[in-house]
Image (cartoon, rainbow, N blue to C red):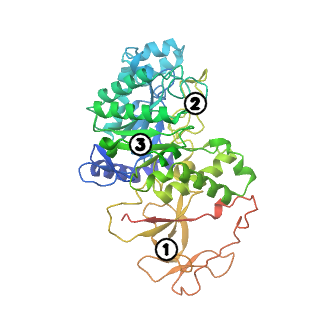
Amino acid sequence: MLLTKKMAKLATIFIFLCTFTTFSRCLPLSTSSRWIIDDKNGQRVKLACVNWAAHLQTMIPEGLDQQPISKIVKHISLMGFNCVRLTWATYMFTRYSNLTVAQSFANNGLHDALTRIAQKNPQLLGLSVFEAQRAVVEEMGRHGIMSILDNHLSRPMWCCGNHDGNGFWGDEDFQPKEWLKGLDIVAKKYKDSPMVMGISLRNELRGPLQNQSVWYKNVKKGAKAIHKANPNILIIISGLNYDIDFTFLKRKHLNLLNIRNKIVYEIHRYAFTEGQANWFLTQPLNKVCDTIKKEIMDKSGFLLKGKNAAPLFVSEFGADQKGMNPSGNLFMGCLLTFLVDLDLDWAVWALQGNYYTRQGKPGMDEPFGMFNNIWNSLRSPQYHAKLQLIQQKLQDPKSKKPKYYWLFHPQSGKCLNVATNNVVEASSCIGGSRWIYHGDGTSIRLTGTSSCLTTSKEGMPLTLSKDCTNNEKVLVRKCVGLDGKSIDNPQSQWFKLVSTNVY
């Protein structure tokens, strides 16, 4: 079987969710303040995406030597993702548009991978690399999965470095005229593909040539080129310093008023961003998480507020799913609380379990990948479960209904729910218990009842009680890390009150 048992259990749930999403969403999309909405009825559309690499030397989406396109796409849907951020290289369209898949793999000496493609996806061999990309996009569309086409770099290769020639306008492989030509070609080729709902201008601007004036000039040119070629599509804009910094927009707004309702800003975040990986191991985790959240808000989160508010798309984040990177493990808990608190649009890195070739190594494993390296099951069902709540739309800007809360445990991805006999347990967030909370000094009540969370004494499990006096503090065990000095890991004790108005 292609699905693991745990994945199969999720299938019926995700089939319902994806089917509902497909039929309740209308394309094209636009923006309204900080939200992405559908044009037809103004309802919010939340992006819950996965990155699928297709920007390396072969120039086609990874994994097509491992499984048929249809099976890969089916599993994207079963995993609960409603869109894919599909990466591409400029030169694929400006220099190699007639190169066939067979020629591309032969040119890179990937004869074994070519043989496997002939077995799994033989229909692709005679297609151009663009036609193969389009075949994948169209298959995703048939499954109700939207596509964001991410201009990852110019020269097909692994990304990214300060001196890789692809970092900023004026670099050896990042010349403005050819870049604009590539954007124009892609926007036109997918003009009649309604499930392609976004194009990013460029991934992770970086390197010694970074310059704010050049950023303003070329971002405007790129946005206008895409909009002219395809006025229905969202335009996704990255900041500076590996896509983390938009602080310059506090001083000077990006003046694109005629296409303002098509602009989305994107940011990236990993444990290693700005060399911060060691913080997670050497400093109190509560302090580290608070510092990083404040930094994100200062450098990009401000875009969500004010008269020029726009959507903020966290288009890359992730961690080693093998659990071998302690910093990454701790980072994920921090970022999930941030994503769920603001109910941001997002795309996790990555789908692919391995690469045809990466940095000269054929078949290189991708430890951040949702698939294992033969693309036949989840690499880590536990990691996948952590994404379950953020895949749901939590904030509806048009809802007039009262808010309630979920009690979210980011380390496991589970929520605190009431089972039979008033037993309180951590289980799936889908269909989970709803709670009412009115702030410090008040109890946490189960909606529709007079019962609240309580415990008889420290060390005893949580239960429900109708006696809610003196229950504003519920202590199950001594809290870790509240002194601001301990570097013990407190994440097993973290529960996040997640506000939602979606019923």
Label 1 to label 2: alpha-carbon separation = 51 Å
Between label 1 and label 2, give the one nearer the viewer: 2
Q: 172 or 449, which lies in front?
A: 172
Which residue is tagged 1? 420
The quarter in which the C terminus is drawn is bottom left
Q: Residue 206 at x, y = what percent?
A: 56, 33
Q: Residue 144 at x, y = what percent?
A: 32, 42
Label annotation for residue 160: 2
Q: Residue 363 at x, y = what percent?
A: 58, 25
Q: Quadrant of residue 28?
A: top left
In the displayed image of the protein, which residue is found farthest to the left? 40
Q: Is residue 479 left or right of residue 54?
A: right
Q: Amino acid at mark 1?
A: Thr
Between label 3 and label 2, give the one nearer the viewer: 3
- Residues at marks 1 and 2 touching, judged by CB atoms closer than 8 Å: no
Q: 414 or 173, which lies in front?
A: 173
Q: 75 or 176, which lies in front?
A: 176
Which residue is tagged 3? 254
Q: Residue 289 at x, y = what percent?
A: 63, 56
- Mark found first going from the N terminus, 1 or 3: 3
Q: Residues within 10 Å of mark 3 (few under 14, many from 20)?
A: some
Say how many tags the image has: 3
Q: Is residue 49 left or right of residue 327?
A: left
Label 3 to label 2: alpha-carbon separation = 26 Å
Q: Is residue 81 left or right of residue 399?
A: right
Q: Residue at x 59, y 50 (%)?
A: 332
Element type at marker 3?
loop
